[in-house]
Amino acid sequence: MSAITFNVTFSVKDILRDPRIRKALRDREDAHLKNIDWLDEDLAEKRHLENIAWLDEDLTEKRHLENIAWLDEDLTEKRHLENIQLLDEDLAEKYQMKKDERRGGYDEQKCDARIWLDGLDNVQCSFNKKGGCFCKRHQNLSDKNSGVWWLGKINKPRPENPYGPPHLPEMRNGKRTHVRIHKWINSKP
Ligand SMILES: [Zn+2]
């Protein structure tokens, strides 16, 4: 028996009509679509994770900035309090210096009025005499009080428990002024 060679030609149309071919093609198409679905899901997942990462960074950044803002406020507050304290100390020191400076000896050139300074009985007015024994202000105030300065003259004994100052009203705008009995630091009880 000799070999027989067929020379057959199929048309594409015929091939595509073959149910087995059609099934194979359909299967391949289905598999392809499934793969695309998986890729899509995969991509979505990745994008989701990336978004979370971005959000995280964003949030961290915001929290960081908020913390800095809080720290700034805190620092400002602290500096403010420190400044107030420094000012207070400064003021206390200046006040003490002024007190020390004005305590003591009698100066004939200066007004004889004894002035009120925290109950110290030896503080002389620092203004110069104007003609008489007082400065202009203390002369005016004394004139309004029958010529008497309510805290007395520095070179004379102090008045005990002076009530005043007489040139101020006891009440102003519904509040008590500092008109009251004044006690010297070393007053006898
Ligand atoms: Zn004076």
Image (cartoon, rainbow, N blue to C red):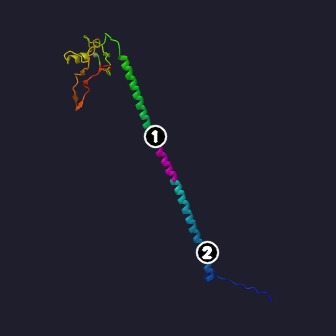
Image location (x, y in percent) of residue 74: 44, 40
27 left or right of 159 in image: right
The CA distance from mark 2 to mark 1 is 65 Å
- Start-end of magenta stretch: 56-68
Image location (x, y in percent) of residue 96: 38, 22
Classify mark 1: residues with Cα within 10 Å, few (<14), some (14-19) or many (20+): few
Q: Which residue is at 44% across, 36% downward? A: 78
Q: Magenta segment, principal secondary structure? A: helix
The amino acid beneath tag 1 is Asp
Given residues 43 and 109, the one toward you in this image is 109
Ligand 1: give its quadrant.
Answer: top left
Q: From this viewpoint, which residue is outermost toward the left? A: 146
User: Which label is found at residue 72?
Assistant: 1
Q: Which residue is at 41% across, 31% downward? A: 85
150 left or right of 118 in image: left
Q: Which residue is at 42% across, 37% downward? A: 77
> Which secondary structure lies at badge 2?
helix
Q: Which residue is mark 2?
A: 28
In the rendered image, residue 41 lying in the magenta stretch gets the answer no
